[in-house]
Structure formats: C-alpha cells, structure tokens
Amino acid sequence: MTIAKPTVEEDILLSWGAAYKKVNKGDIIFMEGGQSCFYYQLVKGRVRWVNINEDGREFIQVMIEEGESFGELPLFDEMPYAATAIADEDSIVLRLCKSHFHQMVRSSYDIHFNFTRLLVERLRFKFLTLKEIAYNNPEQRISNLLRYYKRNTSIGDKLVKLQYTRQQIADMTGLRVETVIRTIRNLHERGALKIQRGKVFF
C-alpha cells in the first residue's frame, strides 16, 4: 500500500505553528457533535472516522491513512464535527489551531486547491458508498469498495494487501460481518481475490 501524498507538507504546517501529538490505539481524538479547535493531519498510524449509534455500533465514514487530514469540515462551515475520530492504531498527528489554519489556507492558492480537491474526492466516495448501499447486493458492494481502495492505494497491476478487517468492511458497507466473511470467501473461490494466511490480496 502506498502512503498518501500529504494534504499539506509537514514543514509548512510546522512553520504555521502546528505541533505533534501522540495518540494511542483506541483514543478518541474528537467527538461527533463537538466544536472544532484544530486542523488534524495524520503523520503515522491510522485513524477511523465513524458515526456511532445508540447500540454502540460504528459506521465507518472513511479510514484515514498517513499524510491525510481529517475533521476539516467544521473549519470551513463552523458547524460541529459530523463524526468521531478514533485512533485505529498507535498514531502521531499534527495539530494546527483553527485561526492559524485559516491564515495558512488564505495565504496559498495551492493549499486551498488541495482542500477543494480533497473534499471533492470524499464527496465522490460518499456518492459511491450510498449508491452501493441503496442498490447493490453484498458482493457488488464489497467488490466496488475493493476496486475504489485499489485505485487509490496501488501502483500498476501489483496485488494489494487489504488493510481493513472484515469487521471494518462491514462497518463501511452496512453489512453484517458474517456476510462480509462469506462474500470474501466466495470471491476467493471464484479467483476475484486471494486469501493467504487470512490476509486478503486483490
């Protein structure tokens, strides 16, 4: 899996006063409904951005990989956080206070355009996932999610190791984990992907 190009280069964030913060696996970085005070960018590790229902079940909006920003919506519309950010593993994030973030974005067309492109990409991903949930059967949902994942994380035709667990795929597609396990096994038997020692490659 390739590391995403940083939304903003680390040295630029540091020059605007950003600071590193270590978060442990399972730590909540911010909560849905809370007010935004910082811009966040993941330096190391992984973060899941989720909505949690009354039963405690998570619906994963997006998995944040190294170099990507998260929780930036309230920085643009002054509304509360739309989802909760949780460290999926031990991670390091860069935090930049809100006022400095606004100054940074206003100072550079390139940085502003990066955020515009990022928001468009995430909106397109939401269209994809909503369409799959509304119309397609489980196999189609999972296949399209894997195709999107490979398109955004791989180079060339090499096999890609899926970094998500079966439970995380279920949480992203609105399926039961048993359905995901069965569907992945069926795809493996048909040669659409490979399972080696429990790991999925496609």
Image (tube, helix red, strand yellow):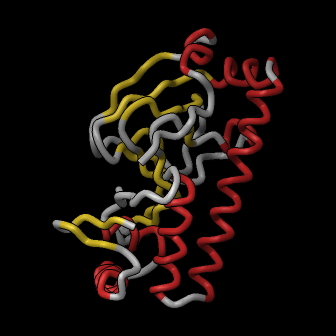
Number of marks in picture = 0
Left/right of residue 43 with respect to residue 75 in the rendered view: left
Q: In terms of image quadrants, where is residue 130? A: bottom right
* Camera-nearest residue between 2 and 122: 2
| Residue at (75% x, 18% y) in the render | 103
Q: Position of residue 175 (x, y in %)?
A: 42, 81
Task: Work out which quarter of the rendered image holds the C terminus and state it.
Answer: bottom left
Residue 19 against residue 90 in the figure, above or below: above
Q: Quadrant of residue 152?
A: bottom right
Q: Where is residue 102 in the image (x, y as percent from the top left)?
A: 74, 24
Q: Which of 175 and 128 is in front in this view?
A: 128
Extreme residue in the left direction: 197
In this picture, is 52 found above or below 32?
below
Looking at the image, is 145 positioned above or below residue 45? below
Position of residue 24 measured from the top left corner of the image (x, y, whole percent): 28, 36
Residue at horizontal 27 percent and vertical 42 percent from the top: 25
> Farthest residue in the front direction?
157
Residue 100 position within the rendered picture, expressed as x and y whole percent measured from the top left? 68, 17
Determine the residue positioned at 60% across, 21% down: 97
Foreground pick, 152 / 84? 152
Residue at (55%, 41%) from the top-left corner? 70
